[in-house]
Image: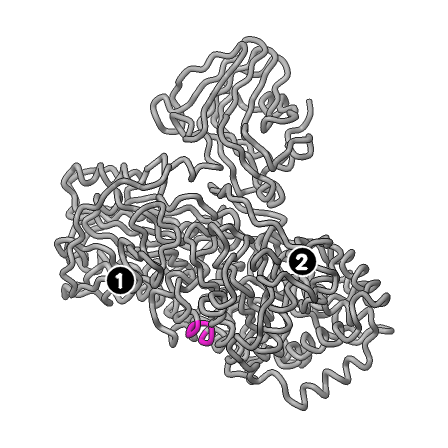
Amino acid sequence: MKGFRGALKGGAAIFVMTAVSPLAAAPVDGSALPAAATAHPDLWPAAHSTGLVDAQTEARVTALMAKMSLREKVGQMIQADIASIKPEDLRQYPVGSVLGGGNSPPLDADDRAPVSAWIATADRFRAVSIEARPGHVPVPVIFGMDSVHGNSNVKGAVIFPHNIGLGAMRDPALMERIGAVTAAESAAAGFDWAFGPTVTVPQDDRWGRSYEGYSERPEITRDYAAAMVRGLQGPPGTGRIQQGKVAASIKHFLGDGATKNGVDQGDAQISERELIALHSAGYVSGIDAGAMTVMASFSSWNGVKNHGNRSLLTDVLKGRMGFEGFVVGDWNAHGQLPGCTEGDCPLTFNAGLDMAMVPSDWKALYDNTLREVENGTIPRARVDDAVRRILRVKVKLGLFDPARPFERKAELALPDHRAVARQAVAESLVLLKNNGGLLPIRPGQKVLVTGSHADDIGLQSGGWTLSWQGTGNTNADFPQGTSIWAGLKQAIEAAGGTATLSADGRVAGAKPDVAVVVFGEQPYAEMVGDVGTLEFQPGDKVALAQLKALKAQGIPVVSVFLSGRPLWVNPELNQSDAFVAAFLPGSEGAGIADVLVATRSGAPKADFRGKLSFSWPRTAAQFANNVGQPGYDPLFAYGYGLTYASRTSVPTLPEVAGIDPSLANPSLYFIPGRAVAPWKLVSKGAVRITNVDGGGRQEGARQLAFTGPGEVRIEGPSLDLARQTNAQVTLRIDYRVDAAPTGRVTLSTGGPAIDATALFARAQPGTWTSAKLPLACFRKAGADMAKVTTPFALAADKGFTVSIVGIKLDADPTNAACPAPR
C-alpha cells in the first residue's frame, strides 16, 4: 500500500522522469489478455492455504451468507479510508473494511494522537457494524493498517528496521519474533489486519520501495515471508485477535520489484519464467504458512495492470497456489484499469479482486458495483466467492467472537518488544570497511558524534513511519525510542569514555580520538522515492564536506550510513576509515552502539553479522546490479559483510560516478548558492539579481529586485509531474521579502499563472520563511503538469524585492495552500 494519499508529511523528494508503459486494453470481464501477460498455471509452483478452510468455519459462513442481502454482500467488497468515512455511514453503506491510510488520523484527533484514539476509532466502527437493526446481518468490519515495520502508524509503538536491513540479518527465527511483536502492538491499538509482509524482490535500486524488499534474491524472501506470516498470525489456523494476532497480507502480487527502470507502479517487462523464478517465492511460502490475505500490486506485467489480470489473480493465485483467503486491492489501483474509474470498475472484481481499496470514492464504487451485479456485468457467483473468502477470514481471526478487543490493548513498546527491535538493529548492520581496525570504539576514548542523522529518530526510521513518507517527525514523536546518538553516548560513557554531540561537526576543545558521522538519505516512500541515479547527494555533497573537514584535522572517521538502498558512496567511503551500512534501523538506535562500541573489557556486546542482501553498486549507473546476472561486477557483492575478525582493507576507490548527476534532480531546483543542474536560473525584464547571505552560507541566496515588469524562471528539461500533482506534492519556496510588492506578483510552472501578491505582501519583511504551494494549484489554473519545463517562474509588474535560498518539490502538505487572491 498505497498510492496517492490525502496527506503527506514533509521532506525533500526526488522523482524519476521515466515514463510508464501504456496499459493494454482488456475486455470488461477480464478474460482475454495479451499473450505476454497471460499466465500458464501449470508452470507455477503449487501452494496450499493451510488452516483457513474447515467444516465448522464454512458452515458458519454459509449460514451468514444465506441471511445477507445483495447490498450487504457487495458492502463486504468495499474498503474505505477513515479520512472519508464515519461510523454512522455504515448504516447506509455496510462496507466490509476500513483502513487507516498513510496519513489518515483517527477520528476526532490528529495523526500523532495517542493509541487510545486509535482504539476508540476501531471500537466505534466495530460497534456500528455489529449493532442489531432491521434488515442488517451483524458482520464486524476488519480494520487494516500499514504495520510494515512494526505498528508504524501509531505514536509510541516499536519501529523495527525496514526490510532491507532485516534481510541482511539472515535470521528467520528473529523475523518470526518481529512478526509476533508487530501483531501484538497492532492488535493492542485496535487493528485487526497488517498490510505486510512485503515480499517484493527489487531488481532496480532506483525504485523508491527497494527498502521494502528483503533481498534482490528470492531465497531470503521465501524464508522470511513464512516467518513473518507465522509471527503475525500464529501457527496456521490457530491465531486469533483475542491472542494478539492479526491477519497478514503478503504483497504486492506480483512482480512489483521488476518494473522497467525501477518506476513505481510501472511495468514488469519480463518473461513468465522470470516472474516465477524471482518473484513468486514469498507468495508460495506465505500461503503455505496460512496467510489470510494477499494485496494486489499497482504495477503491470507486460502492459497489463495486475488489478485486472485474471490469469494471475484467479488462475494462478486462487487456482494453482490454492489461496483460500481474500485478495485486497491497493490504494485506488483499480481506477488505473482501462475503462475504469476509482468509483466504477467491474473489471477488477471479475479478474479476481475480492475487496477494493477505495479511500474516498467508496460510495460511488458501492453503488456502481451493486448495479453491475444486478444487471449481470459482475456475476453473482463472483460476489458470493469474494464474500465467502472475506467472511472466512473474519471468522478464523475471531472478529465475530464477543471477547474483543485484545486484552493487552494500549500496551506498546514493552521492554521485551524493544529488546527484539534492538537485537534486529544489531544483527542488520553490515560492516563495509574497517581499515586499521578502527572499530570497535575503544574503552576510554574521546568520541565526537555528528552528522545530520545522529540525533533524529525520524530520519533513522525512514518512510512509512507515523506518516506515509516518514517525514515531519521529531524525537518527541518517539517517546519509546532511542536515537543513535543517545545509544552511543550511553555505551561510550559506560566504557569510561566521553561522547560529545556536534550538530555541525566542529571540534571544540581537545581533538577527539575518533569521530562518528551519522548521515544518509531523507525519508521517502513509494513514488516519491524513485530516483534517476544511485549517487548519494548528487550536486550538493553536504555529508562529504563534513567528512573531509574531519579528515583534514587528522581525526579518524567512522561513517554510519542510513539508506533505503545501496548507493554509490565512493567519495564518502574514501573519507572514512570505517564505514557501516545501517540501512533504516528504526526506533532502537542503541542497537548500533551494541556493535560499534566496546565495553570496558575491550570487546563489544555483539560482532557484526549482517551480510548484504542487495549488491552494492560500483558506479552510480549500476541500477540493476544483481547476483547471477551476466557481467555481474559490484563494488561489494551480495553476501559481503566484514566482522571484527576480518582483515580486509578497502583501497582508495574511483570517484567517477559514471552517470550525469543532473538525472537526480527532477525535483531540486535551487539550493543555497546556486541552481542545481540541469536547471538554470534565468531572468528577463526589469529585475536585478544579486548575491546575498542566506541559508547559513555566505552569498547563499539570490536577491531578486523588481523595478518594473520582469520575470525570473527556473528552466530545464521537460518533466511529467502528473503523479506528483495527484499525490499532493508541493512546490516549496524558501524566501525572505526585503521590500513588499507594490503591484501584482504571480507564480507559475510555465503555464497560466496564479496570483501570489497576498502571499508575499503578508510576509514579515527581513524574516526567512517558507511557502508550500500544492502542484494542484497550478493544474487548477490550467497548467499541463505532464509537460513542465519551467517548474518555477516568479513575475512582478512593479517594485518588489525578495531573496530566495531554496526551491524544490516537497512531499509535505503541512500548511500548504494555494495563494489567496488579493
Which residue is outermost to the bottom? 55
- Identify the magenta region: 222-227
- Which residue is under mark 2? 334
Q: Position of residue 732 (x, y in %)?
A: 52, 34
Q: Is residue 224 magenta?
A: yes
Q: Is residue 328 visible?
A: yes
* Image quarter in which the N terminus is found: bottom right
Label 1 close to label 2 by CB (< 8 Å): no
Q: Residue at x 41, y 30 (%)?
A: 676
> How far is mark 1 from mark 2, CA to CA?
41 Å
Q: Could you tell me residue 306's position as x and y percent?
A: 61, 61
Percent across and percent down for residue 655 are 25, 41
Q: Answer whether residue 124 is visible to the viewer in this image.
A: no
**Amino acid at circle 1:** Tyr
Q: Quadrant of residue 546?
A: top left
Of residue 132 and residue 577, the one placed in the foreground of this image is 577
Amino acid on which disc 2 is placed:
His
Q: Residues within 10 Å of mark 1 (few under 14, many from 20)?
A: some
Q: Earlier in the sequence, mark 1 or mark 2?
A: 2
Looking at the image, is 96 positioned above or below residue 517?
below
| Quadrant location of the C terminus in the rendered image | top right
| 525 over 393 or under it: above or below | above
Dot 2 alpha-carbon crowd within 10 angstroms: few under 14, some 14 to 19, many 20 or more: many
- Residue 640 image label: 1
